Image (cartoon, helix red, strand yellow):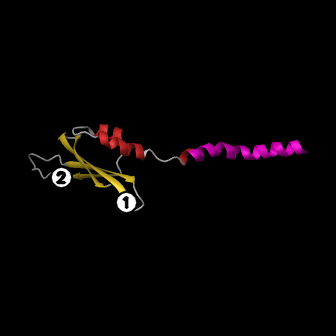
Amino acid sequence: MVPMFWILLAALLTPFLAVAPVAAQTARPPATAQSERNSVDLKQGMTAAEVQTLLGRPRRTALKDGGGTASAPSLGNLKWTYVWPGTTTSEKILNVEFVAKKAEEWYVNSWEWANY
Protein backbone atom coordinates (compact mmCIF):
# COMPACT_ATOMS: atom_id res chain seq x y z
CA MET A 1 0.00 0.00 0.00
CA VAL A 2 2.82 2.42 0.78
CA PRO A 3 4.50 2.12 -2.66
CA MET A 4 1.17 2.92 -4.34
CA PHE A 5 0.93 6.10 -2.24
CA TRP A 6 4.35 7.30 -3.47
CA ILE A 7 3.51 6.53 -7.08
CA LEU A 8 0.26 8.47 -6.79
CA LEU A 9 2.01 11.38 -5.05
CA ALA A 10 4.73 11.50 -7.73
CA ALA A 11 2.09 11.46 -10.47
CA LEU A 12 0.24 14.35 -8.86
CA LEU A 13 3.37 16.48 -8.25
CA THR A 14 5.01 15.97 -11.65
CA PRO A 15 3.05 18.78 -13.40
CA PHE A 16 3.99 21.22 -10.64
CA LEU A 17 7.66 20.34 -10.90
CA ALA A 18 7.59 21.02 -14.63
CA VAL A 19 6.14 24.50 -14.03
CA ALA A 20 8.57 25.50 -11.28
CA PRO A 21 11.57 26.28 -13.56
CA VAL A 22 9.40 28.50 -15.76
CA ALA A 23 8.29 30.52 -12.75
CA ALA A 24 11.90 30.91 -11.67
CA GLN A 25 12.85 32.25 -15.10
CA THR A 26 10.19 34.95 -15.07
CA ALA A 27 11.39 36.11 -11.65
CA ARG A 28 14.75 37.20 -13.09
CA PRO A 29 15.20 40.95 -13.44
CA PRO A 30 14.68 42.24 -16.98
CA ALA A 31 17.66 43.11 -19.17
CA THR A 32 16.85 46.81 -18.84
CA ALA A 33 19.84 47.40 -16.57
CA GLN A 34 22.15 46.15 -19.31
CA SER A 35 20.49 48.29 -21.99
CA GLU A 36 20.79 51.31 -19.69
CA ARG A 37 24.54 50.63 -19.36
CA ASN A 38 24.72 50.29 -23.16
CA SER A 39 23.48 53.88 -23.51
CA VAL A 40 27.07 55.11 -23.05
CA ASP A 41 27.79 53.61 -26.49
CA LEU A 42 25.32 55.92 -28.28
CA LYS A 43 26.96 57.82 -31.12
CA GLN A 44 25.76 60.61 -33.33
CA GLY A 45 24.86 59.27 -36.77
CA MET A 46 23.77 55.80 -35.60
CA THR A 47 20.78 54.41 -37.47
CA ALA A 48 17.47 53.70 -35.74
CA ALA A 49 18.12 49.97 -36.19
CA GLU A 50 21.52 50.29 -34.48
CA VAL A 51 19.96 52.14 -31.55
CA GLN A 52 17.26 49.50 -31.21
CA THR A 53 19.91 46.77 -31.21
CA LEU A 54 21.85 48.67 -28.54
CA LEU A 55 18.99 49.76 -26.26
CA GLY A 56 15.97 47.68 -27.24
CA ARG A 57 12.55 48.98 -28.16
CA PRO A 58 11.69 52.44 -26.83
CA ARG A 59 8.85 52.91 -24.35
CA ARG A 60 7.44 55.88 -26.31
CA THR A 61 7.94 57.43 -29.73
CA ALA A 62 7.05 60.82 -31.16
CA LEU A 63 7.34 62.40 -34.59
CA LYS A 64 7.51 66.18 -34.94
CA ASP A 65 6.84 67.96 -38.19
CA GLY A 66 9.72 70.17 -39.24
CA GLY A 67 7.40 72.67 -40.94
CA GLY A 68 8.38 72.28 -44.58
CA THR A 69 6.38 73.47 -47.58
CA ALA A 70 4.25 71.55 -50.08
CA SER A 71 7.07 71.61 -52.63
CA ALA A 72 9.81 70.82 -50.06
CA PRO A 73 8.25 68.86 -47.21
CA SER A 74 10.22 68.50 -44.02
CA LEU A 75 11.09 65.02 -42.86
CA GLY A 76 10.67 66.13 -39.28
CA ASN A 77 12.30 64.77 -36.13
CA LEU A 78 11.77 61.37 -34.55
CA LYS A 79 12.07 61.06 -30.78
CA TRP A 80 12.41 57.78 -28.86
CA THR A 81 11.99 57.72 -25.10
CA TYR A 82 13.53 54.99 -22.96
CA VAL A 83 12.47 54.57 -19.34
CA TRP A 84 14.30 52.44 -16.79
CA PRO A 85 13.45 51.85 -13.15
CA GLY A 86 15.31 54.23 -10.89
CA THR A 87 15.11 55.02 -7.25
CA THR A 88 11.85 54.66 -5.41
CA THR A 89 10.87 58.24 -6.29
CA SER A 90 11.91 58.56 -9.93
CA GLU A 91 12.65 56.75 -13.16
CA LYS A 92 15.65 57.15 -15.45
CA ILE A 93 14.49 58.66 -18.73
CA LEU A 94 16.62 58.90 -21.88
CA ASN A 95 15.40 60.78 -24.97
CA VAL A 96 17.04 59.97 -28.30
CA GLU A 97 16.32 62.33 -31.21
CA PHE A 98 16.72 61.33 -34.84
CA VAL A 99 16.79 63.32 -38.07
CA ALA A 100 16.18 61.92 -41.54
CA LYS A 101 18.48 62.43 -44.47
CA LYS A 102 15.91 60.70 -46.67
CA ALA A 103 12.43 59.37 -46.00
CA GLU A 104 12.53 56.51 -43.48
CA GLU A 105 16.32 56.79 -42.99
CA TRP A 106 16.63 58.02 -39.42
CA TYR A 107 19.96 58.86 -37.80
CA VAL A 108 20.77 59.89 -34.22
CA ASN A 109 21.10 63.63 -33.96
CA SER A 110 21.20 64.01 -30.17
CA TRP A 111 20.21 62.42 -26.87
CA GLU A 112 19.68 63.64 -23.33
CA TRP A 113 18.73 62.32 -19.93
CA ALA A 114 15.47 63.96 -18.91
CA ASN A 115 15.59 62.39 -15.47
CA TYR A 116 18.38 60.40 -13.89
| Badge count | 2
> Between disc 2 and disc 1, whose residue precedes?
2
Question: Amino acid type of disc 1?
Answer: Ser
Nearer to the camera, 109 or 103: 109
Residue 56 visible, this angle: no
Residue drawn 55% across and 44% down? 25
Residue drawn 34% across and 48% down? 58
From this view, report whether residue 106 is shown above or below residue 83: above
* Left or right of residue 97, residue 12 in this image: right
Q: Secondary structure at mark 2?
A: loop
Q: Are marks 2 and 1 in contact (CB under 8 Å)?
A: no
Residue 9 visible, this angle: yes
Is 32 one of the magenta-colored residues?
Answer: no
Between the residue at mark 2 and the residue at mark 1, the CA separation in whole angstroms equals: 30 Å
Disc nearest the viewer among 2 and 1: 1
Q: Quadrant of residue 11?
A: top right
Q: Residue furthest bottom?
A: 89
Magenta stretch: give its range. 1-24
Residue 103 image point, x, y percent: 20, 41
Nearer to the camera, 78 or 87: 87
**Predominant secondary structure, magenta span:** helix
Q: For label 1, count other residues whose C-alpha is less than 10 Å away and answer few (under 14), some (14-19) or many (20+).
A: few
* Residue at which label 1 appears: 90
* Left or right of residue 35, residue 20 in this image: right
Nearer to the camera, 26 or 70: 26
* Residue at which label 2 appears: 65
* Left or right of residue 103, residue 15 in this image: right
Q: Residue furthest right?
A: 1
From this view, report whether residue 93 is shown above or below residue 104: below
Residue drawn 21% across and 38% down? 45
